Image (tube, helix red, strand yellow):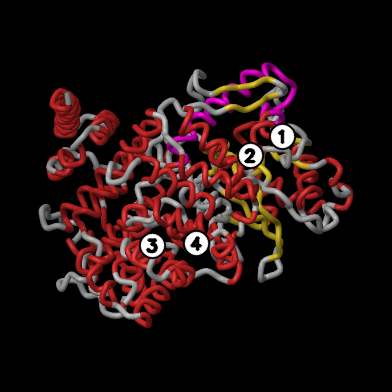
Amino acid sequence: MSTIANSDANSDTNAAVANFDEALQQLGAALLNGTVAYNTQVLDAALHVMKAPGGLDALYARVSVIEAKGVFANSDWDQPAILRPSLAVRTLRHGASPYTSIEVLSELRLLAVAMGEYIHPGISAEQARNFLTQVTALNLDLLSGQMSEADRQRSQRLGEIVNSLYQFLLNRLGYESILDSLVDEVQRLLAQRPIQTDSIKQMVSQIAKCLFDPAIETSGMDKAARLVSALFGPTLGCRDDPGFAVYSERLNAMDEPALRQEAQSYANAMHETGMVSAYHPMLLRHLRGNRDDLIPLALGLSITGNDVFQSYRQIVLKLIDEVVHPKTCQAVYGLALFLERGSLFSPPVASGLWRQLELILCQSASDKLTAVFGDAHPPRVYLLAGVLSLLGQPLGIGQGNNPTCQSVIGLSMWSFNDADYLLQLVAWAARDDDVIMRFEGQHITSQYLEPGLAKEPPNDVDPVSLVLIPHLDRIYGEMGRLCGVRDDDLHRWINPEMYGWWVGHAFLSAISRVTGKIHEYENFIRHFYACYHPYYNSNIPVIHPQPAGIAVTDSGGRLVGRHAITIIRVNLDRDGEVRLYFFNPNNDSGQDWGQGVYCSTEEHGERAGEASLPFAAFASRLCVFHYDPRELGDISLVPGTDVVRATELGRNSWVKSYE
């Protein structure tokens, strides 16, 4: 079957390349004859090649022909020495298809120059390499393979093409030239404490290759060395990355002071970076039954976490026995944070975890988990590891490239606020292949519903999402169907029923359900200030996370699409500015939304997993929100200057698309 698929893919690639070659010859002939000619057909044909397997290799092999046939003639790209990396990034990430296409071809040309495989009279190999180094450094967010909403929503799969180009460049340029930027990017991503860290660990692995490559100058790279050490050798016992067999022998030979030092070092590295070394579970399993008293030290528990450990010792030790393995090492961090949160002091949570430990998975859930995470351990182990990660890191879950943000914020809110309910949903989905919810008195069962927004089940997600999200996605869609035609945005009725009683039952939308246009925008912004801004709502804090809808924009301030987030809190930052802190269910919340609206993730008092914006900047991207009408502040007290600031930002960006 795979042979047939490969044959079809090769056939598609060959056809696309043949069409490109033909368009290239026609352009060259037209220019040679002195007639007016445009490169439109060539650029369109090039896009089809870029989408095909091996397409970039085919175009790279034709760099000299592309140049000779005049694809870059009469354009800025004809003079590569004047090109600027910052503008190239803008063209790649935000340009229309012809501009993205020609930029990709230009960078393939510069790569050939940098590698010494093509000589260009207008730019040297050193200049070309420096240019590409800067472009790759400016695109480091793509290294993890995750695309932002803006990239994902681009037509003609342009986001995927740019992502493929970036990987193509990195594989040939090497990482040494962008190592500093790479380390900063890894630290920026880790500061958000994501549950899914495989891609980040791959980045650290690349850094390690650079550090240990004698041909690469890495002196003074202390930040890089600390990252590599935290993953591959955080303790004296494993500093040389000896492998599991040798490390096991070393553990058996250690005395008590050595074991204490190992435990402390692992905990320090884990809490400093958010990454867990694969050697860490080996220590925990060695301590288990021999020195259980050192387990809190190895988890880095505070007085609170240790109190939970001692109070619920039996279940915690059982979790370690079942879940903690090198293949599931990241669950160690989830377990530590879960104990620190004190959630086990709620009796239903403890009972729910006991049920989860004994849960027999249905065939559908087992097959999904095995297909994604492998068969080194039973599927139930991977699911339980995912449950611990989510319970410990409610803001660490991400939707990745899947259009399931409504469901993902549900997982986050339940983990944050209603952990026993989350455990119930996981049990239903994993054991019964079904989830039950109510909507306005009607029971909804997910098993036989049509797919919701996600037409294909997501597979680039954490274990809980893999099993549960398809059910939630179907239920959310069914709730929308049951709403029928109503006089307001359907989220007004769905969200309180879907997420829980704490969702505000009052609701405002900036977009009229009837006309599809912006409606009473200033009043919308004024109400939001009166509901959430501490200066105007009698200083009432956000008590439970509240779902809200934002209009995501790209770095040019242009509308990309609507997106679900949760409002977590509103506070003064260290500079005295009122900021709104929110959870964005993407794998990276640090996004540039244009107009100077840049989502911060670690520079303004954010807790791990939060993004934040100044209040007016956030309000400018808001399109729907819930609130408690009994806790609405005095609308007349909201200054007109605040309303004007937010509405002007909105009207000059996403609002244009609705007017």
Q: Which residue is mark 3?
A: 276
Outermost residue on the bottom side: it is 257
Marks 3 and 2: which is nearer the front?
Answer: 3
**Is 111 situated above or below 658?**
below
Task: Locate residue 260 relative to residue 653 in the image: left or right.
Answer: left
Residue marked by disc 1? 509
Query: In this view of the protein, can residue 390 be seen by the observer?
Result: yes
Q: Tell which tag, 1 or 4, sits nearer the viewer.
A: 4
- Mark 1 and 4 residues: CB-CB less than 8 Å, in contact? no
- Residue 306, image x and y in percent? 56, 68
Q: Residue at x 29, y 49 (%)?
A: 166
Q: Position of residue 551 (x, y in %)?
A: 60, 40
Tell me the mark number nearer the camera, choosing from 1 and 3: 3
The mark nearer the N terminus, 2 or 4, is 4
Asked if the residues shown at circle 3 and circle 2 are in contact, with their CB atoms under 8 angstroms apart, the answer is no
Task: Specify whether residue 611 is painted magenta.
Answer: no
Magenta-drawn segment: 464-493
Discs 1, 2 touching: Cβ within 8 Å = yes
Residue sitting nearer the eye, 105 or 317 = 317
State the residue position of label 2.
549
Query: Residue 496 or 573: which is nearer the viewer?
Result: 496
Residue under pointer 4 = 336
Above-or-below relation of 650 to 473: below
Ranked by sequence position, the earlier of labels 1 and 4 is: 4
Question: What's the distance in space between the residues labelled 1 and 3, CA to CA?
Answer: 43 Å
Of callouts 4 and 3, the N-terminal one:
3
Magenta region includes residue 474: yes
Q: Of label 1 and label 3, which has the lower sequence position?
A: 3
| Front of the two marks 4 and 3 | 4
Amino acid under disc 2: Gly
Q: Residues within 10 Å of mark 2 (few under 14, many from 20)?
A: many
